[in-house]
Image: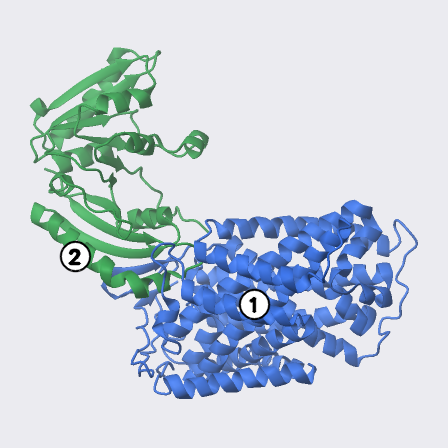
Amino acid sequence: MTDRQSILVPIRVLAGESVPEGVPELLAHSHVVLLGYHVIPEQTAPGQARLQFEDRATERLDEYEEIFESAGATVERRLVFTHDGQKTIDRMIAEHDCMAVLVPNATGPVNDVLVPVRGAVGVDRLARVVASVFGAMDADVTLYHVAAADTTDDDVRTLLGGITDRLVEFGMEPSTIETRIDRGRDPLDAIVDVANSFDTVVMGETDPSLTTFVFGMPAKQVANRFLGPVLIVQRERASAEKDG
Amino acid sequence: MPEQPVDVGPGGENVAGEAPAAEPEAVTDDAILHDDDVELERTIGLIGGLAIGIGTMIGAGIFVFPGLAAANAGLAATLSFAIGGLIALLVALPTSELATAMPRSGGGYYFISRSMGTAYGAIVGLGLWLGLMFASAFYLVGLGHYASAVFAELNIALPADPVIGIGLLFGAVLTALSIGGTENTAKLQNMVVGVLLAVLTVFLSYGVLDAVGVFGGGTVPEQFFSRGYFPVLTTAALVFTSYLGFAQVATVAGEIKQPGRNLPLAMVGSVLIVTVFYVVTIFVATSSFGAERLGEFGETAMVEVARDFLGLPGAVAILGAGLLATFSSANASILSASRAVYALSRDALLPRKASKVNLRYGTPHVALLAAGGPILVLVGTGRVELLAEVASFLHLIMYGLMCVALIVLRRRNPDWYSPSYRVPAYPVVPAVGALASFGLIAFMQPASIGIGIVVMLTSYLWYRYYAGDVTLKGDL
């Protein structure tokens, strides 16, 4: 067993978002950082919104905190009034050292987990999150890779085998881990397609590049198209990474 | 920056039985923290702060004042603008120190109420709110002048003088827009400011080269003090409205990232940049036509100056820039005025209802209407110079008191007072800043001073009636 990992669960608490069904059970073995946030337009001072909405938002968060705790998670919570939701989420990830962010969507009991793997970068964190969230849950984990034309099956097996070893090292039952390789498809479409027969998806964040700047992070795109919950494992951040 | 709560413990109740909202537990670079893990995110960066300051300032002064100022003071109007800039700088430095010690919404009102007590705070806070209304009304009348100039340029004859009508229309549109929750207003403001600076830089570079004789015959024909020395100061008092923008930066101090660094840079930087633009503009304008003719052109003199240099395209470019600039100034002031209402109602000096946020749009509709409504009445008067001077008067009172507040705080030196930026040459800078601010008032028209005093008295009486028991002063 690994230690509990911190998972950020951002909820737009006054915009009608709530904790979807199945999510508390999904994170029963995690340390949940519950972020209730409320985005306000620029002509409103954040303090002004707080004066009016704090009580209502706190009430909701109380409820959600209890749901998570009764499912078995440990919970820490924050309520933030902001003009810029993404900035708040990024700050919370940094301040609480969160390994992953959950894009909350409803799910039934989690039996099958899809873990798309891009490459060798960040697999340690990916394995840690998978093992800690699903290790004690008796769920089947499928490591999935869409291979490029110039990659041999052996290369891919080495990559996925390495991750399997890490998962076992972290206490997972080898029999619950499967691997699956696809070729000749657009990775993104392939992942979304395959994901439909799974309950949840765990995938790593990629380093930002020009492509991700224009089209958004692949993980986010998958989260937008997949109907179940998606755990986005955060890349390691340089501690000095702050904006001016 | 370490966490540094302002230990003030506000107390008391107003007539309606509302107490001031509790102060936050701590203030960091990224957020303001309240108890129970409630936070207010800071989201405005340095560029955003500069855009608020420059965007508010450059609109008013540069497009509306050249004609009026030249008529009053001749070429020496350049000196008037320089004096205004110097005073603004002398106040911006102490304001920066106060803002880094207390990076909260409300700006000058917050600093003064926490250091000198509720009565001063009420006078300044209500004065700031009303001052911003006068300023917005002034910008809107300026906008009306520019819009009418567009009609004149298109040779469309209008049955009546459209200036006030257009000002009223835009005032109503701006209020409605801000209540409706326009997205990305900040980004738009940054863009407008960028475009303005670019247009002005091209135009002024050409104008300066022309004035010193590169293109034509060098035309700096006039004696510098063609109207004598005294008008230089009265003009400085008149055009000081042009320098109110840095105070607007302080009203959003609670939302600026890394306030210890960004607040002083945004305030001092915007004053310096704008001063340079003003002085050069007036120099170019007066040297192209001479003060006499420039004065005859009135509020839209800049259009004629541009036409003189660059023909019709120049006139069109300046018309467009003038419209954008006066629009952005008015918009920024209406938003600041609603921030002022929020700060006052948070502290129970105005009913809590006044800062109510509209659930559908997420905007403070009561505060925005409370700003927008009276602005329309003021626009209706159409008195450019009077509106500008009253706005200046109310701000100058606040500026002077902020300098005094700084001296008071430094002398008492309470535990919570630990600014990360400190004013140079203390106590000379704040002392001179206070004297200069109060001194400039003496050069205003009696009517403006009268209206300003009435506003202050009314504010004080309101405080005595409505919130006489409220205490906001910081623990020492």
Q: Chain of mark 1?
A: B
Q: How is colour applied across the structure in the image? A: by chain
The residue positioned 71% from the left and 69% from the top of the image is B82
Residue A227 at x, y = what percent?
Answer: 23, 31
Near-viewer residue (B71 or B25)? B71
From where the camera sits, is residue B342 visible? yes
Amino acid under label 1?
Leu
| Residue A208 image label | none
Q: In which image quadrant can residue B271 be found?
A: bottom right
Q: Quadrant of residue A198?
A: top left
Q: In this image, A38 relative to B392: left or right?
A: left
Can residue B56 be seen from the camera position used here?
no
| Residues marked 2 and 1, same chain | no
Callouts 2 and 1 close, C-beta under 8 Å = no
Q: Is residue B278 above or below residue B314?
A: below
Toward the viewer: B231 or B91? B231
Task: Give the distance between the C-alpha atoms of the residues marked 2 and 1, in whole angstroms.
Answer: 45 Å
Q: Secondary structure at mark 2?
A: helix
**Chain A drawn colour:** green
Q: Which chain is blue?
A: B
- For image coordinates 34% across by 61% down, the residue present is A49
Give the x, y percent position of residue B392: 62, 75
Residue that carries the numbered disc 2 in the rendered image: A62
User: Looking at numbered disc 2 in the image, what kind of residue is underneath it?
Assistant: Asp
Residue B47 in the image: above or below residue A24: below
What element does badge 1 sit on? helix
Mark 2, chain letter?
A: A
What is the x, y in percent for residue B30?
Answer: 38, 57
The residue carrying mark 1 is: B376
